[in-house]
Each structure stands twice: as structure tokens, then as C-alpha cells.
Amino acid sequence: MECLVQRHIVVRFNRKTRKITINRPNFAGGNQVYDWDDVVASVDPDDQVVTKKRKREILMLFFFKQRTGAEHHDVVFLGAPLRSDHELYALWEYIRRYMEEGPENLPKPKCIPHFPWPWRSLLAPWSFLENKWAAASWSPRMIALVIVVSPLMLVHATAHWCSLLLCWPVYWPRKLRRESTSSGAPLEHG
């Protein structure tokens, strides 16, 4: 289903212009540029409860039409599924601090490799079992389940890797590349 499309949807955070640019293929809405002040994250910054309980969550950024003036709402998913609320809050805090305070006091971000290595595709089917494995990792039932579904997971991972090989990498339009180089290196997240 994902063959012959853009490999990742990449989000660029430009601190100097206070803009967020979402790089999407034209058939999926094309590139969108939003103001930093219009973003609503899927985390509540006032929530003081940060749990380390394992679950699969993805950081989502919402752009509501009432705030952006667009004809419709927009949402973008950032990064891979995270394992806990703690990781979700940490990713959002990293992005927020980058946009509000600058990159000086932040560690270098982990970048997505340009080549789709095959072992990364193994993580896609494993994500379906990850929480169950964490709850009862070496129980006989869990080991049996992993053994039974391993061939299916291997087929899924192979298909996932092949689809990534047939996708093209993200290219930014020339205008956005110029804007980014003239105003400092932006933070990108996919």
C-alpha cells in the first residue's frame, strides 16, 4: 500500500520564523506551513502525572481551523510509537524547548537514517506484540505466541522493507531550503 510514495512525512520546525512546515506528497495535501502559536499537542503540559507504564502512543500535533484560518483541521503524527507517557512528554518538551529557547542547551536530535535498513523494518510487526511481551516476556504462552506468529512477522517485515526501498526520500522545495539555510538550521522530525 505504501510503495512508490514519499518515504516519510517530515516536519520541519523553524525557530527563527516560528513556523512549522509539514512535507507531504501532493496527493496527501501537499506541503503545509503553520505558525508555531497555532499548534496543539496531544500532551497536556499542565499534567504533572508522568507515568512509565508501557503503552504505544504517538505524539500528534493538531492544527485546528479556528486557529489557523484554514478550511479544515490538520493533524500530523511525529516519530515512532513511544513506550510511555514519559517518552511522549520528553519528545514534546524537546520540541517546545527548541522552539521557545533555542538549540543551545539541548542534546543533538537523533536523526532518521536515509537508507531504510532491513532490521528497522522488523520493528514494525514487533510493535504489535511489544506491550504483551513486556507484560509477560518469558512466559510459556508468550514464547509460543511469538514462535507461532514469527513467520507472519518475517513476511510483514520483508514487505515493509521492500515498500521502503520503493519509496522516494523526502525532498524540500527550493524555496523552503533557501529559507532554512538563511535563518539557521531547523529541527526536523519524521
Image (cartoon, helix red, strand yellow):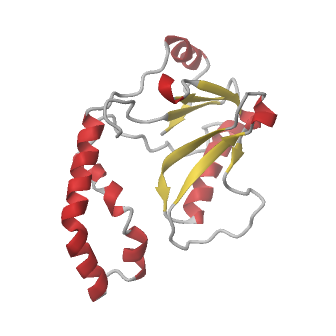
Residue 23 visible in rendering: yes
Residue 21 position, x and y percent, is 60, 28
Which residue lies most toward the right here? 66
Q: Which residue is drawn at 20% across and 74% down?
A: 147
Left or right, 30 with respect to 125, comes to: right
Image x and y of residue 180, in percent: 56, 20
- In front: 93, or 5? 5
**Vertically, is 118 above or below 23?**
below
Considering only vertical position in the picture, is 126 above or below 169?
below
Q: Which residue lies furthest to the bottom in this view?
A: 140
In the picture, residue 5 is in which quadrant? top left
The total of numbered circles placed on residues is 0
Residue 55 pos. (x, y %)? 51, 68
Q: In this rendering, would 73 be left or right of 110? A: right
Q: Quadrant of residue 104?
A: top right
Q: Quadrant location of the N terminus?
A: top left
Q: Nearer the viewer, residue 28 or 139?
A: 28
Residue at x-position 65% and y-position 51%: 93
Q: Is residue 138 visible?
A: no
| Residue 85, percent from left and from top | 59, 64
Residue at coordinates 21% horizontally, 73% vertically from top-left?
148
Residue sitting farthest toward the left:
151
